[in-house]
Image: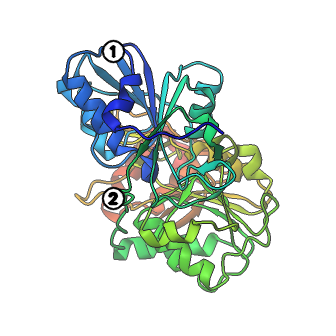
Amino acid sequence: MKPIRFVSADEAVKAVKSGDHVHFSGVAGFPQILADALCRRGENGDLRDVRIHHLHTEGRADYADERFSGIFFNQSFFVGANVRKAVQEGWADYIPISLSETQKLYRQHVIPVDVAMIMVTPPDRHGYVSLGPSVGTTLAAVQNAKTVIAVVNENMPRTWGHSIIPVDDIDIWVEDHSPLFQATQPPVSDTDVQIGKHVACLVEDGACLQMGIGSIPNAVLAQLDNHKNLGIHTEMFSDGVLPLVERGVINGSNKIVRRNRIVATFVMGSKKVYDFVDDNPGVYMMDVKYSNSPNSIAMNPKVCAINSALQVDVTGQVCADSIGTKFYSGCGGQVDFMMGASMSKGGKAIIAMPSATLKGVSKIVPTLTEGAGVVTPRNLVHYLVTEYGAVNLYGKSLQERAKLIISIAHPSAQEDLDRAAFERFGPHYHTF
């Protein structure tokens, strides 16, 4: 085992050279101290054309600011709130890719990794550290980087699975024991509760769940108290699963892949959820290549993939990353899990969303807004859910789909949607 010598963050980022590609670990494992030091170095004027890559990050993202134009160019694999404005204005950019494929960009050297900046637990007595609640694409970055800079943080939970890496994989060490980022749980509205009830009715005992973070996932989880033997194989999870684990509702006993264990690639939430995953053999934090593989997902029976959307058209096409040409998020793992659920025995691929925006604009539309992209194609959507109900689109024709989808649109939009569908599909639309 190589000896460990800590240096300052400003000393560590001297490893970055002009023209380099830099990877940041994300979410709770985001090394803010290194990002800030890199920005200070950028202000000194001795760096040019450094490209920065990451999945979702929280906290300050000064490296994406206009003032660093020509110095840093952020090309993320997902558009989080902290880089959204920069991406929309063109000072930063987005690489469209499914989450399962992000690791392949590094492993197949489509994108080089000159420097990987990560956060880890203190080394254990066997010479290993853990990536804690944030494995994602970072494991692939570490395995392919020319230089790895690690921030040791005693607040990082030590997790099981692919998160364990040897200290010899790390070249430069920095110490910072700042608290991890904690995501506050958003309030659950009456609309969310209604959506949660409709989705819960689709979840069978023994199902394996995938869902994200937010008010709708929390509303769904809150309705599952009376279910039995649920499992989790997901991209990420948060505090909402903890009550169901404590009550034994989530036990993974019906899973095939990692039976009795929760599988994820990152965790974001409060200190309570970080404490829950700490040294917990019931939770496996896995490489995104594994967690988001449709083949791995599909090995479990009754996979319920529960995802959301910004817009859905009357044929079931799902836009989840942009409104028109303005990007708000990314492909993420939606297609990975919708595909995995479709392939799973008894699986259900579900899109759940409010029928309208907070401003009253219908999210169900005749056609997607010009410039919008299709994240999930219509053929992968089994169920669409709003506060007005759940409709089964599987095996339905375009005209049948349109009627079903319009039936759960906001009442104020249904007449216009029905008229547009008639104009699109012709005289037979109203005859069956």
Name the residue nearer the viewer: 337 or 43. Answer: 43
Q: Is 270 drawn above or below residue 69 in the view shown? A: below
From the top left corner, tell me how far across and down residue 407 is, in percent: 47, 62
- Which of the 4 image quadrants contains residue 229? bottom right
Which residue is labeled 2 in the image? 356
* Secondary structure beneath label 2: loop
From the top left corner, tell me how far across and down residue 304 is, in percent: 65, 61
From the top left corner, tell me how far across and down residue 383 is, in percent: 59, 58
Q: Which callout, 2 or 1, points at the residue further toward the start of the chain?
A: 1
Q: Quadrant of the C terminus?
A: bottom right
Residue at image location 34% in from the left, 68% down from the top: 186
From the top left corner, tell me how far across and down residue 181 is, in percent: 37, 57
Q: Is 333 drawn above or below residue 89 in the view shown? A: below
Report if residue 358 is visible in the image: yes
Q: Is 337 drawn above or below residue 371 in the view shown? A: below
Q: What kind of residue is marked 1? A: Asp
Which residue is labeled 1 in the image? 49
Q: CA distance from mark 2 to mark 1?
A: 42 Å
Label 2: few (<14), some (14–19) or many (≥20) C-alpha neighbours in 10 Å: some
Report if residue 102 is visible in the image: no
Q: Are marks 2 and 1 in contact (CB under 8 Å)?
A: no
Q: Quadrant of the N terminus?
A: top right
Residue at image location 60% in from the left, 83% down from the top: 246
Name the residue nearer the viewer: 333 or 265. Answer: 265
